[in-house]
Amino acid sequence: MTEVKNGDTVKIHYTGTLTDGSVFDSSEGRDPLEFTVGAGHVIGGMDAGLPGMKVGDKKRLEIAAEDAYGPLNPEARQAIPREGIPDDIPLEVGIQLQMQSPEGHVLPVTVVEVTEATVTLDANHPLAGKDLNFDIELVSIG
């Protein structure tokens, strides 16, 4: 039976959980996730955990933050003057906004603190700094 190797296109079903067991993503009820192993389409720990699997295999991948979305970058948090944000934009902790970099790239940010004078925005990926677990099932190797 064929085993997964780098360069193979695979389809997997998965459930991603944090170390406390809470689910952050799952393919349940959706088509399997399809990607090329080793091409950087998924987090590094996922790419590294698939080679050697066969169709039908199930596996739990425990992925350290460094091999997932990386560590939290304190420089990705920035307090900006509140008056710099248009009045029609809601400013509640946890709200996701989109900013534009000087180069024109759209950057998703999360409001993490609101004071009378400033709004602190965090551009870290929501899963940065977190160890992740994935329960996966290999559906096919293409």
Image: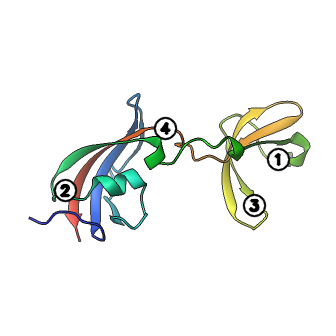
Is mark 4 in CB contact (under 8 Å) with mark 2?
no
Q: Is residue 73 above or below residue 93?
A: below
Element type where label 1 sits in the image: loop
Q: Nearer the viewer, residue 75 or 13?
A: 75
Question: Mark 4 highlights which residue?
Answer: 130
Which residue of the protein is positioned furthest toward the front in this rendering?
66
Q: What's the residue at 35%, 53% (across, down)?
A: 46
Residue 28 shows in the view: no
Marks 4 and 2 sit apart, C-alpha to C-alpha, by 25 Å
Q: Quadrant of the C terminus?
A: bottom left
Q: Badge 4: few (under 14), some or many (20 or more) residues near its Cα, within 10 Å?
A: some
Question: Mark 3 highlights which residue?
Answer: 101
**Residue 88 marker:** 1
Of badges 1 and 3, nearer the viewer stands 3
Disc with the residue nearer the chain's start (4 vs 1): 1
Question: Mark 2 highlights which residue?
Answer: 53
Disc with the residue nearer the chain's start (4 vs 2): 2
Measured as percent of width and height from the top left, residue 52 is found at 19, 58
Q: Amino acid at mark 2?
A: Met
